[in-house]
Amino acid sequence: MNIVLRLAWRNLWRHSRRTWLTIGAMVFSNILLVFMISLQFGMYGLMIDNTLQVFSGHMQVQAPDYKDDQKMRQVVEDVQPLAARLRGELQSETIAARGWAFGLASSEERSYGIGIYGVEPVFEANVSNIPGLIGQGRYLEQNDAAEIVIGATLARNLRIRVGDELTLLGSGLDGSFAAAVLNVVGIFNSGIKEIDRNIAEMPLGMFQDMFFMDGAGHQVVILAPDLDQAEMLQARVEEIVSDNNELVVQGWDALQPGLKQAIQADMSSAFFMYGILVILVAFSVLNTQLMSVLERTHEFGIVMALGLKPGRLGRLVMLETAMMGLIGMLLGAMAGALFTTWFTVNGFSYPGMEEMVANFNLPGRVYPRATLLTMFAGPLVVFVFTLAAAAYPALRLQRLHPIEAMRTL
Amino acid sequence: MHMFFVLSRLAWRYLWRNHRRTVVMLSAIAVGTWAMIFMTALTRGMVDQMIVDGISVIPGHVQIHDPDYLDDPSVYNRVALSDTELTARFHDAGFVAWASRVRVPAVVTSERESRGVTLLGIDPQAERSFSFVDYDAVEGRFLDGADDKGVVLGAKLADTLETRVGKRVVLMSQDPDNEIADRGFRVVGLFHAEIEVTEESYAFIGKRTAQDMLRIGDTVTEVVFVGDDYRDVEPLVANVMGRVDDSVQVSRWTEVDTYLGTMMGMMDGFMLIWVIVIFLALSFGLVNTLVMAVFERIREIGLMLALGMKPASVLGQIIIESMMLLAVGLLIGDVLAWATIKPLEGGIDISVVAKGMEMFGASSMLYPNLSIDDVILANMVVMILGFLASLSPAWRASRYEPVEAITKV
C-alpha cells in the first residue's frame, strides 16, 4: 500500500471514537436523505400518475383558449376523425376524443349541477382509469346510446341506482336549450371526492346530439407510455396538428399547473431541510479535522523541518477526510438502502396521512421509490461537503512555521 | 452553591481554552437552532393561514346541521328548527358571532355559459365580522340585507360566465319537492378571494330571497357560530349543545373539514420531529467536542481527583461546560432566527407556485409566524437532549483512576 495512504489510514484511527462519531453523523444524515428522497420521488411519481390518469392524460389537443376558460364554444371541429388520425399516425391506441359540458342532472327526487364528459366508449379506457373503476353496472359501450355513468357520491345524493333514468339539462353549443333522458348503466368509485360527487360520462355521439355539437368536441386526450416519453410524443403531436392553427397541444404541466407547482413548493422546502442536515454534518467534520490538525501541530513541525512540503501535509489531511467521508457515504448509502427497502415493501404511512394527502390524489400508504439516484444523490452531496469542510484545516497548514510548530506542545 | 460557581467559572474557561473548536461547535448549534425555528415559523405561518382561510370559507368554528346534511348537502336536509326559533335560542347566548344561512348546490347560467356553484343565502349584517368576503372591497356593492334581490359572484366565476355587474344571471336549484326552483338575479357585486377556487365556487344572495326561491319558508340548512379561539372550540360546542336537541348535529370545524383538522394536529408533531432530527444531527458533534475536551485534559482531571476533587464535581463540571455551550449556541440561534423572521413578517410572495399552494389549500402569500411556544419547545428539547448526550463523556471523565490519568501522556 502507498505510504501516504497508509499514513492517512492510521491517523484516522488514532482517535477511533472521534472518527466513529463523525462517521455516525454522516451515516445518520445519509439514512435520512436516502429515505426522504426516495419517499419524495415515490410520492411525486404517484401524484403525477394518479392525477393524470384520471382525466387529463399527458397532453391534450384543444382549441387555443380552452384551457384557461373552458367554454362550450371553444371546440375542436371533427374531433373523432382527428383522434382517429392521431391514432393512425402515432400507432397508438391511448388516444381518445372528448367533449365537456356543464349540466343539471335530475332524478325523481334531486337535482345537482355536474360536469359531463362525452367520451368514446371504446377508447376512453385507454386514457383514463375511470372506466376501470366501475363498481356497479357496466361502462358505456355504444357511441350513440342514451346511457350515462356517474360517480358514487352523486348517485347516492341523487338517490339513483343502476337501471334508473336521469334527466340532463344544459345549454347547447349554439346557446339553445339542451335536454336528454339517459339510462344510468354504471356507477364509478374513484375515491376522489370531487370526482365522485361532480362528474358523469356519456357516449360522445349522444353528447354531440344532445348539445348540438355537429361533430365537434373539446379535447383529444393522449396518454404517453410513461412520463419520460411525454415530451417527445408531444413534439410529434404538435407536428401533426401544426397545419391547423385552430388547435394547440397542452402538456400535462399546463393542464395541471397546480401539480407541478405543488411539487416545486414541496421540493424547495424539502431541499431546505436537506441543506441544513448537510451543513450540520459539514460542521461536525470541520470540527473533527480541525482538532486532528491542531493536536498534531508539534508533529507536523518536525516533519516539515525534515523537509516535507506543507502542500503534502494538506493533501494528507484531505486524504484522511476523504477516507472518512467514503466510509460514511458507503455505510450511509447501504443503511439507507436497507431502511428504505423495508418501506418499499411494506409501504409508509402515519396516522392522519390519508386526510393529508388526499388533496394530491394519493392513497393513505405510499411506497418509496428506491433508485440508484435516490440512493446516492444525498450521500454524494454529504461527501462533497465533507471534503469542502476539511479545506479550512488543510489550508491552515500552509501557513505553519516549522520552528513555532515544534515549540507547541 | 459556592461549588457551583467555581465549577461554572472553570467550565467557562475550559470552553475558551480551545476557542476554535468552541466557535465551530457554537456555529453548528446556532445554525441548527436557526433552522429549527425558521422552518417552524414558516410552516406554522402557512398552516395558520390555511386554517384561518379555511375556517372563513366553512365558516365559523362550530356549525349545526341536519344529521344527514354533511353527506347530502341538499335543501331536503334542513335544520329542524325554524329561523325564528333559532333566533330566540341563540340571540343572547354570548357568541362572538353567529348566523343562520341557506347553503345548497345550484347552477348559475348567464347568456353564454353555465356553472355549478354553492349558493349561499345569507344575512349580510350577521356575517360581516367573519365572512371571507371583505364587503367594502367588493366590485359594485355587497348585499344590503336578507331581502336583497341581487346576487354577488366571485370575480373569476363572472369571467367564466362572461357576465359583469349590472347584468342578469339565472340561478337554478331545487325545492324540497324536487321541483326546479329558479329565478333571475341582477349581478350587484363581484368579490375577490385569496384562493381562486373560492372565487369560482360561491354565489351570495339574501337569505329571505333564497328561502322564497327554494320555497322553504322560514327554515335554513345551517347555523354557524364563531367563538373566541379556533384552537379550543369545546366551550363553544358545549354552549351550542346546551341550546339544541338531538334533531340537529353539532360539528366542530375540524369535523367539517377533516383535511384542515388533521393539518392542525400534524403541525405540532411535525415540529417536534424536525427539532429532534436537527438535534440528532448536532448531537454527534456535541458528544465529539466533549469527548475531545475531556481527552485533552485527562492529566488535569487526574490531578484534580488526586487533590481531592469529588468525581461528582468533575461530572458536574463537564455537564456545565456542555450546557453553557448549548445555551450560548441556542441564544445566538434564537437571535438569528428572530432577526431573519422579523423582516419577513410582512409576508413572502410565493405566487410563482400559487396553483400548487392551492392544492395544499394555502394562499400565495406566506406569513411566517414566530410562536413563542415553538421557540421554547425547540430550546427545551435541545437543552434536555443535550444534557442526556453529555452524560456519557462526563461520566467517563469522572471515573478516571487518578494515578493512571496523571501518568497518561
Image: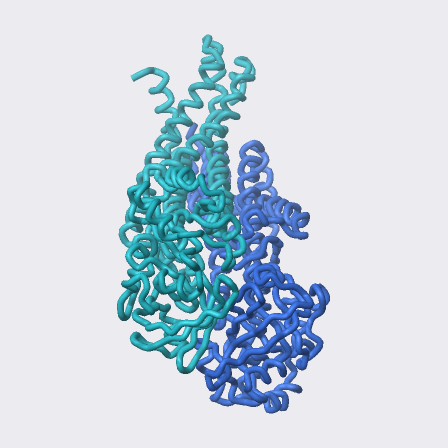
In the rendered view, would you say A14 is above or below B238? Answer: above
The quarter of the image holding the N terminus of chain A is: top left
Total label count? 0
Q: Is residue B216 above or below residue A147?
A: below
**Of the pair A150 and B88, the residue shown nearer to us:** A150
Q: Nearer the viewer, residue A210 or A351?
A: A210
Q: Residue furthest top?
A: A307
Relative to A367, say whether B200 is above or below.
below
Q: Position of residue B306 (x, y in %)?
A: 47, 39
Residue at 45% x, 9% y: name it: A306
Percent from the top left, x then y, of residue B316?
51, 48
* A214 sits to left or right of A132: right
* Color scheme of the displayed model: by chain
In this image, B165 relative to A196: left or right? right
Q: Tell which chain the image draws in cyan.
A: A
Shade of chain B as shown in the rendered figure: blue
Judged left or right of residue B342, residue B43 is left
Q: In the rendering, at what x and y percent does residue B256 appear?
A: 49, 72
- Determine the image quadrant of residue A152: bottom left
Q: Residue at x 52, y 85 (%)?
A: B79
Q: Residue B335: in sight, yes or no?
A: yes
